Image (tube, grey):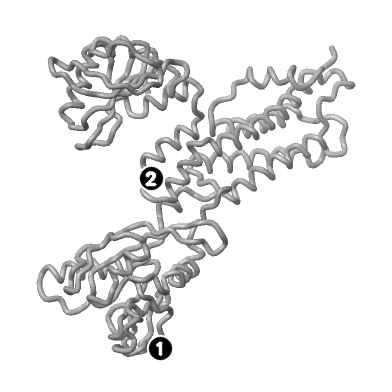
């Protein structure tokens, strides 16, 4: 990230491609000057108003809103220009701004400036990036918690508690020659550390790994052609995602969509629902390729939904042809159960459904969640998802604090700390790990706490 943050940056902030409306964003001390030079005369803070931009002789209709620093996202003067989202028009406006003193923003630079301005901590900045990259509801919810500062607030609170504790220990080092000055006793220090450790371990136990959100269990609908797999796929999702037809072989590729479920222990969780081509004797090269994709997908499935509409669960490779039993990772689903009078009933089905009307879908959802209970990562309003950096810092902090408590074990009955320098070194290591979550705490921050939290009386 560039060290210079007083220059003016510009970037197209809307996704690539054509759209009804595109967004160009500027930030820096020449923002308002650049706007004037491209035809925006007069600005009203935070008021969206129509303007006409001049970009190399081309008049472009746009909407403009400005944000005066420091009350803006980056803490600097900012502007957002909304205009027709044709890539050529956006590019022309971008180059018009570049010729008037702006430069292209580097990846993440707007949010980097927000971090430098104290508008966001590091975890919130990571939440912005995670929100952009989210591909499922679980990832989006987890990213929102980061962006809203939930982890940062918890970490900041524990950083302050640990910094106050370290300040007392370091104050004791400064007054080792004065026996009457004991900022904190070994027992009191141990009690403080026990409280902080309890909060850290509780946070870790209630949090989820970010990797668990990226590796959703795959639930694959498998069966013969025209047994209602795609209809059930759409019904579970609550929207039309797969094409439905009475013609066999409509589904060719593997369709994947996240499916949100009620977790067995409470909260919400997600699986990746996959619809594949029906398995039968292929009629040509296209059928063979579609079924090859289906079989590879089935082999990698965490859970199979074996779909039958009355013809029997007789297709390979899911059914043991000798024992006539499904694999252990399967739920047998009887579709079109409203046609039982016209088709034979399936005595060994785990659940019967009528997908178009929703009959049996709640029970099927419950069965899916129950069968994958050990693989699902439930999301509740109190649970956080930790990225690898967060988890590593928290676990390292826990390790340092446990080392500190271990070093105090033989001193708990004492009046003053022995080996205070070693204790302080361990505490500072733990503090550095915690402070790294949301920002940096310098030695001056700790020094200031000596006088803010402890009166030495000298």
Q: Which residue is mark 1?
A: 347
Tag shown at residue 9? none
Residue 245 versus residue 398 in the image, above or below: below
The answer to whether residue 22 is left or right of residue 197 is left
Is the C-beta separation of discs 2 and 1 under 8 Å? no
The residue closer to the viewer here, 326 or 332, is 332
> Residue 214: x percent and y percent?
40, 51
The residue closer to the viewer here, 396 or 88, is 88
Residue 416 versus residue 371 in the image, above or below: above
> Residue 168: x percent and y percent?
76, 25
Q: Give me the residue at 54% from left, 64% from top.
A: 264
Which quarter of the figure has residue 451? top right
Helix, strand, or loop for circle 1?
loop
Q: Give me the residue at 39% from left, 66% from top.
A: 302
Q: Which residue is mark 2?
A: 134
> Residue 42: x percent and y percent?
32, 11
The answer to whether residue 91 is left or right of residue 235 is left
The residue closer to the viewer here, 1 or 341, is 341
Q: Earlier in the sequence, mark 2 or mark 1?
A: 2
* Category of crowding for the residue at label 1, using alpha-carbon neighbours closer than 10 angstroms: few (below 14), some (14–19), many (at least 20): few
> Residue 274: x percent and y percent?
32, 63
> Could you give the CA–CA distance between mark 2 and mark 1, rounded to whole angstroms?
42 Å
Q: Give me the residue at 21% from left, 27% from top.
A: 90
Helix, strand, or loop for circle 2?
loop
Residue 329 versus residue 53 in the image, above or below: below
| The C terminus, quarter of image | top right
| The N terminus, quarter of image | top left
Which quarter of the figure has residue 127? top left
The answer to whether residue 410 is left or right of residue 167 is right
């Amino acid at each position: 990230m560039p060290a210079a943050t007083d220059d003016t940056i510009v970037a197209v902030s809307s996704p690539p491609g054509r759209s009804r409306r595109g967004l160009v964003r500027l930030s820096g001390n020449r923002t308002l000057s650049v706007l004037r030079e491209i035809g925006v005369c007069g600005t009203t803070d935070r008021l969206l108003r129509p303007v006409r931009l001049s970009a190399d002789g081309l008049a472009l209709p746009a909407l403009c809103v400005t944000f005066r620093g420091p009350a803006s996202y980056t803490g600097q003067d900012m502007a957002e220009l909304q205009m027709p989202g044709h890539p050529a028009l956006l590019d022309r406006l971008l180059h018009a701004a570049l010729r008037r003193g702006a430069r292209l923003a580097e990846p993440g630079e707007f949010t980097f400036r927000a971090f430098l301005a104290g508008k966001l901590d590091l975890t919130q900045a990571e939440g912005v990036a995670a929100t952009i990259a989210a591909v499922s509801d679980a990832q989006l919810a987890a990213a929102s918690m980061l962006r809203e500062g939930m982890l940062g607030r918890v970490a900041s609170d524990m950083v302050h508690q640990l910094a106050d504790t370290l300040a007392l220990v370091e104050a004791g080092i400064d007054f080792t020659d004065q026996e009457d000055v004991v900022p904190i006793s070994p027992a009191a220090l141990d009690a403080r550390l026990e409280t902080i450790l309890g909060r850290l371990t509780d946070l870790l136990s209630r949090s989820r790994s970010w990797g668990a959100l990226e590796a959703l269990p795959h639930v694959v609908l498998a069966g013969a052609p025209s047994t209602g797999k795609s209809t059930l796929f759409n019904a579970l999702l609550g929207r039309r995602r797969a094409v439905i037809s009475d013609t066999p072989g409509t589904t060719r590729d593997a369709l994947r969509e996240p499916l949100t479920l009620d977790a067995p222990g409470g909260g919400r969780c997600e699986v990746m629902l996959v619809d594949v081509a029906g398995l039968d004797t292929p009629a040509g090269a296209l059928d063979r390729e579609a079924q090859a994709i289906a079989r590879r997908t089935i082999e990698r499935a965490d859970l199979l939904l074996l779909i039958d509409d009355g013809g029997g669960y007789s297709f390979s490779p899911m059914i043991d042809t000798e024992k006539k039993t499904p694999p252990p990772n399967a739920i047998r689903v009887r579709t079109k159960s409203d046609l039982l009078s016209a088709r034979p009933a399936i005595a060994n089905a785990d659940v019967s459904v009528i997908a178009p009307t929703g009959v049996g879908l709640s029970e099927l959802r419950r069965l899916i969640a129950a069968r994958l209970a050990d693989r699902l990562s439930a999301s509740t309003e109190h649970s956080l998802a930790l990225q690898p950096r967060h988890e590593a810092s928290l676990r390292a902090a826990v390790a340092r604090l446990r080392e500190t408590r271990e070093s105090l074990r033989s001193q708990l009955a004492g009046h003053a700390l022995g080996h205070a320098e070693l204790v302080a070194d361990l505490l500072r290591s733990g503090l550095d790990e915690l402070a790294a979550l949301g920002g940096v705490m310098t030695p001056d921050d700790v020094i200031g706490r000596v006088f803010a939290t402890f009166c030495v009386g000298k």
